[in-house]
Amino acid sequence: MVKTKVISKISIVMGSQSDWKTLVKCEEILKQFKVHFEKKIVSAHRTPERLYEYSKNLKKNNIKVIIAGAGGAAHLPGMIASLTHLPVLGVPIETMTLKGIDSLLSIVQMPYGIPLPTLAIGENGAKNAALSAISILSLDNKTLEKKLLLYREKQTKSVSEKPKNDKD
Ligand code: RP5
């Protein structure tokens, strides 16, 4: 019997098209690391059946980590976490009215038993979610681990010891 190689993937999921301008930052990093990923729009409120379908098929679709971003009454990441045992990383999207504090509090305050690691509001959170997902995948992927270590080493080297003036 021929064994087909199973490709582990990260899933980037968002509540709305409007979240993509933030979550595209995840995509940029995942592409840089040449990690396989998918991207989907699933709204906890507007498409609840899609949410259920998506969450229940994650394992079957070889998804290892989910990056879930939503804004406002951001129930998407928590609901996905309630429907799968796989790691879900929550990204609070910055909002016009409350600057994303609403998103952050909706995502971070989970009840005991359904963990939902939550990143910073906005683009920094999206970028760090991608790096966290890579870190999780690298636990059993040596090539990815090497890339991650190199990325961090380069970052460390890029920080100068002394501040420069604008004119320098
Ligand atoms: C949430 O409502 C989405 O995650 C999005 O951040 C927010 C606003 O959605 P739109 O009205 O822009 O579609 O469900």
Image: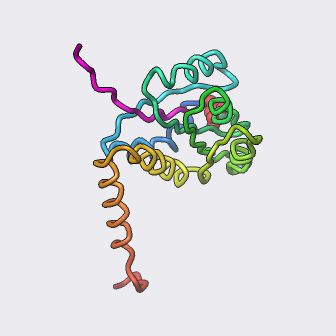
Q: Quadrant of the N terminus?
A: top left
Q: Is residue 160 above or below residue 151?
A: below
Q: Quadrant of the C terminus?
A: bottom left
Does 11 appear in magenta?
Answer: yes
Q: Residue furthest front?
A: 1
Q: Nearer the viewer, residue 59 or 74?
A: 59
Q: Indicate the position of residue 125 as horizontal and vertical percent values.
A: 55, 51
The quadrant where residue 116 appears: top right
* Residue depicted at 70% across the width and 24% down the height: 45
* Residue depicted at 55% across the width and 38% down the height: 87
- Residues rendered magenta in the picture: 1-15
Q: Is residue 160 above or below residue 154?
A: below
Does 162 appear in magenta?
Answer: no
* Quadrant of the picture in which ligand 1 is shown: top right
Q: Indicate the position of residue 145 as horizontal and vertical percent values.
A: 34, 52
Q: Left of 86 or right of it: where is 25?
A: left
Q: Left of 149 or right of it: where is 105?
A: right
Magenta part, dominant SS: loop
Q: Indicate the position of residue 12 as horizontal and vertical percent values.
A: 49, 35
* Residue depicted at 60% across the width and 43% down the height: 90
* Residue depicted at 72% across the width and 38% down the height: 113
Display colour scheme: rainbow
Q: Indicate the position of residue 27 as horizontal and vertical percent values.
A: 41, 41
